[in-house]
Amino acid sequence: MRDDLAAGDPMKKAKGSFRIGIGYDIHPLVEGRPLILGGVRIEHDKGLAGHSDADALIHALCDALLGALNLGDLGVHFPETEEWRGAASTKILARVAGMVAERGYRLVNADCIINAEEPKLAPHRAEMAGAIASALGADAGDISIKATRGEGLGPVGEERAIAAEAVVLLEKVK
Ligand code: MG
């Protein structure tokens, strides 16, 4: 390609500037635990079991952010040690956001799906986006959270688990 063309070609300029990442997580739904999703405590008769607060949505998002930078997965950086026992996942997300910033990237947008039979999550979407944006240092308008039910099928549909998926796009800023 001629250099004068390359200099004016936005696609050429963008090469290497953007990175995409995908994340997935699932936690068992059990009695005697609070339900925390997207950094928000949601009234329900069951909650998610796990070493931290078991916030499947934030864990999926963290894995997507780490994946975009090829930094391995959440388990590598946040092992099941005392430090992270019962920890708020927003704290883990803030730490991951630091890794993103350290490497000179910023979040363009995140698109997330929560798979849950119950409770209804639509009324909590805005609050979850706000809590995530605040932990990430991002704009809530760039965090999309969707919810879908299991329609009675599998561990999600049988209300034995809640799962989440996330895709992120990062942009190099320095
Ligand atoms: Mg998890």
Image (cartoon, rainbow, N blue to C red):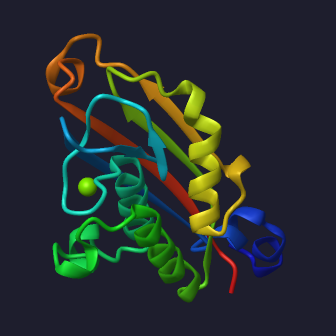
Q: Is residue 101 above or below residue 48?
A: below
Q: Position of residue 24 (x, y in %)?
A: 30, 48
Q: How many marks?
A: 0
Q: Quadrant of ligand 1?
A: bottom left
Residue placed most toward the observer, 79 or 12:
79
Residue 48's spot in the image, x, y percent? 25, 43
Residue with the most extreme front position:
32
Camera-side residue of 159 and 82 = 82
Vertical placement of residue 64 versus 92, above or below: above
Q: Is residue 73 visible?
A: no
Q: Quadrant of the C terminus?
A: bottom right
- Left or right? Give the position of 75 relative to 24: left
Q: Residue 62's spot in the image, x, y percent?
A: 40, 63
Taking depth in this image into account, of 19 and 1 the one nearest to the observer is: 19
Query: In x, y percent, where is residue 53?
Result: 31, 57
Image point (60%, 84%), residue name = 104
**Is 142 positioned to the left or the right of 40 in the image?**
right
Q: Quadrant of residue 58?
A: bottom left
Q: Say which quadrant the N terminus sits in.
A: bottom right
Look at 65% across and 51% down and name the residue there.
130
Please identify the quarter of the rendering in which residue 85 is found: bottom left
